[in-house]
């Protein structure tokens, strides 16, 4: 369940949002384009031109960056289960078919997942996306506005119902846009908790998902590797 929920939590619903969400910011929360005070965040971009998938792949974290307790997990075969969203109008109206692709709808992308042996079953995944900076900025805002708009909803994946509870967290002071949330997935009476932190810097979007402690430990390291200091 843990591995599947990491994939569901961001890529499924973000694919829905990119496909057509209008993206309104929930009342009382800051837009990903703003800091927590509601003021626009200053530009912090060092990457204004899109990066190819090959370059993104080179800039993913590697075992050597993380330490000896981490093992890279082989990529699993893509699955295309029917996905139905229940209890979140912003996602319901888009339908579940767009979610089957398993990744965000940006042209250049790369992904890696690691298993941490120091804590049984703990994983951390990194996803990188790149597009023209204005397109990436708008798409990122649409994605995260849609995902944080419903604190509790349900998805049915094939015939499996999964309850999803979301809690918006303070965004890190990184990049041009930043966002973070905690997702609790409940299936068959079992809970799985995943933290997701996303940072857009110019034409690159970084997403780190997984065990909350591992996400907090590695998001800045991942960003530094994606956008090297000049």
Image: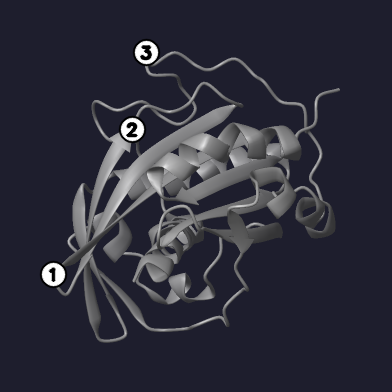
87 relative to 46 in the view: left or right: left
- Image location (x, y in percent) of residue 75: 61, 73
Q: Of discs 1 and 2, which sits in the foreground?
A: 1
For numbered disc 2, what is the local secondary structure? strand
Q: Of discs 3 and 2, which sits in the foreground?
A: 2
In the displayed image of the protein, which residue is found farthest to the right?
230
Instruction: Kindly identify which residue carries mark 2.
Output: 169
Q: Is residue 187 above or below residue 15?
A: below
Tell me the distance, in whole angstroms, between the alpha carbons under discs 1 and 3: 38 Å
Q: Earlier in the sequence, mark 1 or mark 3?
A: 3
Q: Would residue 60 be visible to someone looking at this image?
A: no
Instruction: Kindly identify which residue carries mark 3.
Output: 37
In the displayed image of the protein, which residue is found farthest to the left?
189
Instruction: Kindly identify which residue carries mark 1.
Output: 189
Q: Which residue occupies the foreground of this view, 120 or 19? A: 120
Q: Is residue 205 above or below residue 111?
A: above
Q: Which residue occupies the foreground of this view, 185 or 38? A: 185
42 relative to 37 in the view: left or right: right
């Amino acid at each position: 369940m843990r591995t599947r929920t990491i994939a569901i939590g961001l890529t499924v619903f973000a694919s829905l949002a990119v496909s057509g969400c209008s993206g309104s910011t929930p009342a009382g929360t800051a837009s990903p384009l703003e800091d927590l005070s509601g003021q626009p965040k200053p530009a912090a971009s060092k990457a204004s031109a899109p990066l190819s998938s090959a370059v993104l792949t080179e800039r993913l974290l590697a075992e050597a960056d993380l330490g000896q307790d981490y093992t890279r997990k082989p990529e699993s075969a893509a699955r295309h289960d029917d996905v139905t969203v229940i209890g979140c109008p912003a996602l319901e109206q888009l339908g579940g078919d767009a979610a089957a692709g398993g990744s965000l709808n940006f042209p250049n992308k790369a992904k890696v997942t690691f298993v941490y042996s120091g804590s049984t079953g703990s994983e951390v995944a990194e996803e990188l996306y790149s597009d023209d900076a204005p397109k990436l900025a708008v798409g990122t805002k649409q994605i995260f506005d849609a995902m944080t708009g419903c604190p509790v909803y349900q998805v049915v994946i094939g015939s499996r119902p999964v309850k999803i509870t979301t809690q918006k967290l303070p965004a890190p002071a990184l990049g041009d846009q930043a966002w973070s949330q905690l997702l609790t997935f409940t299936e068959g009476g079992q809970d799985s908790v995943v933290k997701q932190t996303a940072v857009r810097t110019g034409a690159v979007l970084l997403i780190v998902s997984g065990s909350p402690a591992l996400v907090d430990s590695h998001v800045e390291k991942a960003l530094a590797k994606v956008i090297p200091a000049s």
